[in-house]
Structure formats: structure tokens, C-alpha cells
Image: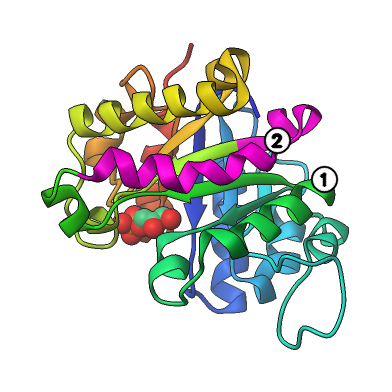
Amino acid sequence: MTRTPVIAGNWKMHLTRRKASALARAVAAHHAGAVHRRCILFPAFVHLDHVRRNIRGSGVVLGAQNCWGKKEGAFTGEISPYMLRDMGVEVVLLGHSERRHILGETDALLTDKLKVALRAKLEVLLCVGETRSEREEGRTLDVVKRQLRILRFVKDHQIPRVGVAYEPVWAIGTGLTATPAQAQEAHAAIRETVARILGDEAAENLPVLYGGSVKPGNAAELLSQPDVDGALVGGASLSIDQFGPILDAAPIA
Ligand code: 13P
């Protein structure tokens, strides 16, 4: 990945097939021709193929919300990153806070997922972020640094396929947003930590996206921070009326 601004929509467990296809078409039409930003959509697994067909030729990138940590085998109900790649998926989200906190995903599990996803030639967008109580206890940066430690398993040639999304748990779906200063502080700490793990050049080129109640009204200011390279948008990615202006907030270098 590079530091071209990235605007990504995480559709979570929303939309019907028909609505996902229509929204994908609308995003594709809005984004087509833009070269100063990347646009990635993360639909539910069952909608991937429909979205793929509707974004074809637009430059919108197909992403998946999760994958399993093995290439293949007896893992009923799980999806291999190789299957995603075969389907045309280019990016996978790993470690979203809903998966860490609702489904109990651990750093050990995420290590397996990271390794196999990278081996399958996917890009990985690793999500990190503190809970409200961790922030109140002053542990934000410790938590984020711990979550980043799994990046030590990234091999040199895989570094260009890794990005990070900082998503403070208390800001997700709550309408509360990190202030631009809070986001910048966390993003700078993420870049410093990645420099220690993977080297200065890797850190300099690392895309670090912000997520947590990004809306048309706050996107531009968040994206203007020096270490904020993009937005991972949940609720506001579900309508083109909101996602379109967020796409347009991506700065032109
Ligand atoms: P919201 O934009 O709905 O707060 O969700 C953010 C998120 O979790 C994106 O992955």
C-alpha cells in the first residue's frame, strides 16, 4: 500500500444483495476516474461477487471483512484468504474491534490470519484501537502498541501490502469521534511503533486510516492531519449521499 489517501467503506452485516449491488454501482460511478485516492469496499462475504461485478472498471477495490487463518481444511463455516483472492478480493480487514470484542479474536488468532492472508497475496488492513476504559486509564498507546506487535511476522517483501486502521472502540457507531488531535496522536504513535518493528521506510509508507463515526462533516478535518492517510467508514458508508462527500474529502496531494 502507499500513502495515497484511502476512503474505505465497511458495510459490516448490512444490506440485501439488491441494495449492495445498487450501492456498489453508485460508489463506482462516484469514484470512477479519480486517481488521487483509493476507494475500497468491504461488503459481507455473500455480496462480494455482486459487488465485484458492479465495480468492475471503476478502480474501486474489493475488500473482505475477515478471513480464516488457514489455507484450507475442515473449518466449517470459515473462509480461506485463498478463496477470497480467487474471488477477486484484494484487501482483507483483520482484527476489527467487533471481532476482537464480540467474537473474542485474540492476537494469536490474528497472527495466523495475518500470515496466511499475506501468503495468499492479499493486502491486510489491521484494525487496532482502545476501549473507552482503556483510554480513561491512560492506556491508549500501550494497547495500540500491543495490538501492532503481530506485524513482526510480516516479511520484507510483504510490507507494501500492509496497512493499519486506528479505530477507537468508543468512537465506533456511537457518534463520538476522536478529535483530530487525538487521532493524530494515535496515528503518529502507530507510525513510530511500526518503524521499530518493520523499519523507517515501512513506517513512512504505511497507510494509517482512521475509523469511528467518520461523517461528511468531520472527514476533511480528520484527513488533514499529517499522519491520517484515510478513513474507514461504517454507518456513513451505507448511503452514497454520505459516502460520496467523504470520498470527495480525500485531499488532492
Ligand atoms: P462507524 O463509522 O459506524 O462508527 O464504524 C466505524 C467502523 O467500525 C469501520 O470499520
> Label 1's element?
loop
Q: Earlier in the sequence, mark 1 or mark 2?
A: 1
The amino acid type found where label 2 is placed reads: Arg
Placement of the N terminus among the 4 image quadrants: top right
- Residue contact at pointers 1 and 2, CB within 8 angstroms: yes
Which residue corresponds to mark 1? 121
Which residue corresponds to mark 2? 161
> Label 2's element?
helix
| Residue 9 belongs to magenta span | no
- Relative placement, left or right, of 143 versus 11 is left
In this view, the residue in front, 209 or 158, is 158
- SS assignment for the magenta stretch, majority: helix
Q: Is residue 163 above or below residue 169?
A: above
Q: Position of residue 51 (x, y in %)?
A: 68, 62
Residue under the point 30% across and 38% down: 141
Crowding near pointer 2: few (<14 within 10 Å), some, many (20+)? some
Residue under the point 18% across and 57% down: 132
Residue under the point 47% across and 32% down: 208
Q: Position of residue 66 (x, y in %)?
A: 62, 64
In this view, the residue in front, 211 or 33, is 211
Whole-number angstrom distance, CA of label 1 to CA of label 2? 8 Å
| Residue 150 belongs to magenta span | yes
Q: Quadrant of residue 217?
A: top left
Q: Position of residue 161 (x, y in %)?
A: 70, 35
Mark seen at residue 201 = none
In this view, the residue in front, 243 or 178, is 178
The amino acid type found where label 1 is placed reads: Lys
Residue under the point 55% across and 79% down: 16
- Relative placement, left or right, of 210 versus 21 is left
Residue 65 can be seen, yes or no: no
Disc 1 under 8 Å from ligand 1? The reply is: no
